[in-house]
Amino acid sequence: MLQEEARKLDRFIQLLLANATVFVSGEKLAGSLKVSRMTICNWVHRLQAQGMVIEIKPKIGYRLTQVPDLLLPQLIRRELHTKVLGRSIYHYFQVKSTNDVAHQLAQQGLPEGTLIMAEEQTQGRGRLGRDWYSEKSVGIYLSLILRPDLKPRHAAIINLAAAVAVSRVIECTCSLTTDIKWPNDILVNSKKCSGILTEMSADLDQIKYMVVGIGINVNHQSFPKSLQEQASSLFLEGGRRFSRTEIILALLRYFEDLYLELQEQGSDVVLEQWIRRSSFARGKEVSVDLGDKKIHGTTVGLGKEGTLRVKLCSGQIEDIVSGDVVIWERPN
Ligand code: BT5
């Protein structure tokens, strides 16, 4: 769906929500949104298919009587108590990737804190061109535009801060115990329930903007075979459904607190919290796939810029900037 159409559809839902006690005529809706009555009719059928209950009275109009668990900006805005994050909200029913939309909007000059959410991603992305499975309306797929006053080499700290915020929200809102696998996998019972993809546009010594993309498996009841061993959802681990809206509200608050503290006090505040929340920070025997080689060793903390420090058998310490970490299964 084109961005402009998606914006109009959101405005349409807003009008239905604002007038939920009365029937609104198709003509009036079409006029205020500058679309045809046929478009209104198509949208109504589309929303009904998404679980919205909309009464249709011929020659009179439409009335919204029941809203499903959609990530409606109108509802999020009403409950949001942040200064920066979510000050502008874009919601889409379907996009390729919320990170792609965020890049486009950032290049158009949208401000820091702009939030982009989608019910479904058709080409959700992980790191290094990998896919992110994004089933419709059961997960959280969001991206935030940030414009931090940081040198590009400090960007990894933002990634770690997002991981801390996701871990905190899963613990506080869903009462589940989490672990963080460096740099950005949030695990519940050793299975991945969330991933973060942080991208940036930068000059040599200044970040122009960053896009922090967060995916959380919330109410998924199952996963494709290829992911079943490693992935899970809060529903599968917690045994009940969770409100995606409530999780997003808490996430934005926790992330903003840490983001503002980071800019005032420096990276230690993030590093300390990350280390406290991760069993991978110290004393874990790991293998790290660096692309061109694999190393084995024991983790000995984080470097100032968010690197993972691994002590090799030789005693030498490697600072890992990027790579895939797994628990080292020592050969017998
Ligand atoms: C990540 O990459 O974990 C980053 C994921 C970021 C997703 C968000 S959603 C909103 C925003 N828009 C986007 O397009 N992306 C971001 P990485 O560490 O490379 O992990 C990717 C790997 O995790 C895949 O190769 C699979 O093995 C696995 N995977 C894919 N989908 C998964 C899912 N839903 N849950 C758990 N694991 C998954």
Image (cartoon, rainbow, N blue to C red):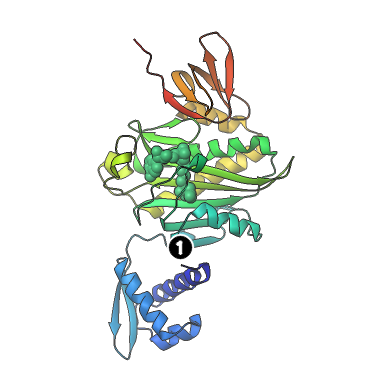
| Residue receiving disc 1 | 92
Please identify the quarter of the rendering in which residue 154 is found.
top right
Mark 1 CB near ligand 1 (8 Å cut) = no
In the current view of this chain or complex, which residue is farthest to the front? 292
Question: Residue at 54% across / 26% down in the picture?
Answer: 292
| Whole-percent x, y for residue 219 in the image | 31, 49
Q: Is residue 155 left or right of residue 228?
A: right
- Residue nearest the observer in this picture, 44 or 133: 133
| Whole-percent x, y for residue 117 in the image | 47, 57
| One can see residue 274 in this view | yes
User: Please, what secondary structure does the residue beneath circle 1 have?
Assistant: strand
View quadrant of ligand 1: top left
Q: Residues within 10 Å of mark 1 (few under 14, many from 20)?
A: many
In the current view of this chain or complex, which residue is farthest to the bottom? 59
In the current view of this chain or complex, which residue is farthest to the right? 205
- Residue nearest the observer in this picture, 241 or 97: 97
